[in-house]
Amino acid sequence: MPQMIKVTMTVNGEEVSADIEPRTLLVHFVRDHLGLTGTHWGCDTSQCGTCVLWLDREPVKSCTVLAAMADGHEVATVEGLEVDGELDPVQLGFMNEHGLQCGFCTPGMMMTARWLLDHDPDPDEATIREAISGQLCRCTGYENIVRAVRWAAQHPRTQPTEQEVQA
Amino acid sequence: MTSTEPQASHDTAAAPEATDTLTEAPPKETPTISSPAGNPMGFGRMLRKEDARFLRGQGHYLDDLVMPGMLHAAILRSPVAHARISSIDTSAAEAHPQVKAVITGATLEGLNLAWMPTLSADVQAVLATDKVRFQGQEVAMVIADDKYAARDALELIDVDYDVLPAVADARKALDPEAPVIRDDVEGRTDNHIFDWESGDEAATDEVFANAEVVVGQEMLYPRVHPAPMETCGTIASMDRVTGKLTVWSTNQAPHAHRTVYALVAGIPEQNIQIISPDIGGGFGNKVGIYPGYVLAVVGSIVTGKPVKWVEDRSENLSSTSFARDYHMKGEIAATRDGKILGLRVDVLADHGAFNGTAQPTKFPAGFFHIFTGSYDLQAAHCKVTGVYTNKAPGGVAYACSFRVTEAVYLVERMVDVLADELGVDPAALRMQNLLRPEQFPYTSKTGWEYDSGDYPRALRLAMEMAGYDDLRREQAEKRERGELMGIGVSFFTEGVGAGPRKHMDILGLGMADGCELRVHPTGKAQLRLSVQTQGQGHETTFAQIVAQELGLPPEDVDVIHGDTSNTPFGLGTYGSRSTPVSGAAAAVVSQRIRDKARIITAAALECSPDDLEWERGRWFVKGDPSQGRTIQEVAMLAHGTLELPEGVEGHLDASVVYNPPNLTYPFGAYICVVDVDAGTGEVKVRRFVAVDDCGPRINPMIVEGQVHGGLADGVGMALMQVIAFDEDGNCVGNSFMDYLLPTSMECPSWETGQTITPSPHHPLGLKGIGESATVGSPPAVVNAVIDALEPYGVRHADMPLTPANVWMAMQGRPVRTDLAVQ
């Protein structure tokens, strides 16, 4: 058996530890070791962006990050967007504006959209398009994803989340 | 044919400025009746049921599934395009501590599984035994404890290849000196697969001989790949005790797969269950059965454990179903004043190393012979020759409606070439030649019976939305300044919803679809479909069909699909056939329930069924609306003790098989505006106006979303996407670094509009929309770019119109875009 290392990180606010192969990619760690299969994998070359999650509150393509590099850091995935049974405005925007069809790129798109709105609460179309330009969607032609993010911008959360309060 | 007024959709009406669509929420269509949950009681905008799980990351795609004791497989693939295998040494891989089994062609020969039938009556190697015939062909499978170990062990397999010359250029496949690729077939001496023709050759030749104007153009529809975001994969689990095989796989046609597994593996069909879980996009890529699927079954038989195989992206792009690869020589005949008289075309079709196209048996070139398009011609004729090359097999994938894509591209480019020859406006030339409403139903010169249409109205609407005349004025001004702006028009007619059983089958399976509706005692229902959604939203739209026909709230109808043991037989989702075929089945099965509900209501009210009248969701006594029974009340009565008339069984279930009497013929008019950088050849799509007519729309939100996606496909194919090969047969488009897909930056804000012309033979008038935009948009983009290059005298250049290819065309040196050599 290959040599293993221990990693410990915070995922969606909870501390997790696991013994893994050093070469384990972060995308495989969250999917296969933690069972958080909302983060997807879609290419070998960091082009498609279906694996986007947050590492220390920044979107990253988790197929190009080793799980070992996340040791001691904070990871957030799509499964953490819903808080106390309340969907994030981004999730509501994607539903209301039909921003998803097959749903495969959606988690990555939403993680980037949430990050964008956290930094620019009222982005225009060009800003939204640029923010998601590193991620591919084959179903929507991007139009309704842009509208979904605009919808979320127009319907911000009324209450800050616990994480936001702490931040 | 009656039809409603044309309209531009909310996001586009007089809104050329894209940002306008974003400043305020678009008005929503308001349905006349709402369900208790606020959904439309039938057709109308309804948010999707499937979103609840996808938005939370709780979808269940193939690679999300884990079975107890599951092993992981990886495939060793050929690094070369054509070679004889002299030896395979798997001993080191087998000695790897985490490896459970290694399967080679020799293993399969022992099981008589080395070859499998394709969907076009050819055979394909599951694992190479004698030769490899394309780069990326399957050579061995390793099964291990985990996916990393399986990949490691691939490196330990030693294969000796004696490399042979490869056929990478389809135009050389029939040269006498070309190496024979398919020498597995005894007596084969060349790479010829088939010759096929349609139309009246003599009549066409006569029209051409007497025509005032004849103009020809060679063009390539290059090889592309649909590249859904989720790659293909499977989990196979063979229960050694019961003999039952369960296969979870990324597939669009579970029932067809079940039958093929039974035929290939000899497993009794009742012992096979195919489950298609959530699918991360299909577009035709997930119709066929790939060697990896069969190998996982073999792996499960060998190891006694469930075996998962999921391909990586380069495997997806280099070995699974590609699309197009049509080399076309078109000729168009016309009068000097612009009346189109005839069309003829000679096609060389590259089918790769195995003939694995998925299409109705009688049509080796798919529905390409719909190439007369939307025009009234005197004669037409096409010849298609299929050839083998040392490239991946496939041919019909990527939302092409069985090669209507290639046909539409051909005719829409030819009309622009004619416009250029005659010096007339391409939109005006189309308007002059479009079929007129009174000509429907129209039988084309190649035998298609177009069901309904009002083509000029759709084109007029598109031109109004685009502000066509203003655009031409703007273009003229820009040309004065040396700026390159282009306006491209395309008009398309599709034939979708395959198809009538007596004409259409795949592998002998007629293309009818079953549907079952069970209304439970409490008035809640389950609808069981043979088709499989890959993002189209069937769980929502099929519930809306039941709501429309039966008045059951759509939230009360659970749509069950994608599992052969829980759904009736049918051919699956591709060729835009779900709504035309399965959607018709859902309507008819609902109507059967409604008819039965009438009898039960009459029994309950002690009146004649003839005395009853229907309003959505309720039968009532004519003239006394207070006397009646809702469908929910009928459901309980049907399961209760009410005495029913002689011959009427209890319960409220029904099943049907729908055999479509004809194809449906959606159509549309598209206008694309581009700006081309004269210094670099870079094309920017500034605007895209799409008017689609797919008949009534079950859920306008979903229809529009599908149009958006198809338009992005068109921009991608026209400007970016190509699976090219070098002269040795190396695939140079097998990653997303080389196979470029459009991002949010390449796509404009789409402007959509609609006209509604119902199909006269579909029970709800529906025509299907899934592939319309993918079919119709590429010629609009290409026509726009060529229009922009008018000052350079460019009449044609092949897709993809990358900056380099555009620049070369501007220099008068067009390139072969399918070959990675100049």
Image (tube, rainbow, N blue to C red):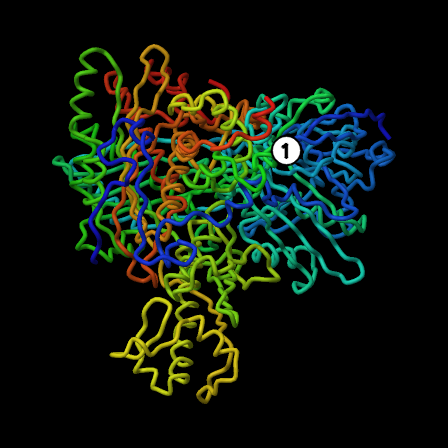
Q: Residue at x 73, y 60 (%)?
A: B244
Q: Closer to the camera, B123 or B90?
A: B90
Rendered image quadrant of residue B286:
top right
Q: Is residue B174 visible?
A: no
Residue at image mark 1 = B312
Q: Residue at x 71, y 57 (%)?
A: B245
- Residue B775: x and y, percent? 37, 40
Extreme residue in the left direction: B337
Tell me the quarter of the image containing the N terminus of chain B: bottom left
- Residue A119: x and y, percent? 49, 20
Q: Closer to the camera, B93 or B200?
A: B93
- Residue B23: x and y, percent? 32, 29
Q: Residue at x 17, y 16 (%)?
A: B477
Extreme residue in the bottom direction: B646
Q: Is residue B578 above or below residue B325?
A: below
* Image position of B633 (left or right of B568): left
Rendered image quadrant of residue B8:
top left
Q: Is residue B202 visible?
A: yes
* Image position of A80 (left or right of A130): right
* Image position of A72 (left or right of B48): right
Q: Is residue B646 above or below residue B562?
A: below
Rendered image quadrant of residue B242:
bottom right
Report crowding for label 1: few under 14, some 14 to 19, many 20 or more residues within 10 A (C-alpha). Answer: some
Amino acid carrying label 1: it is Asp
Element type at mark 1: loop
Q: Closer to the camera, B160 or B26?
A: B26
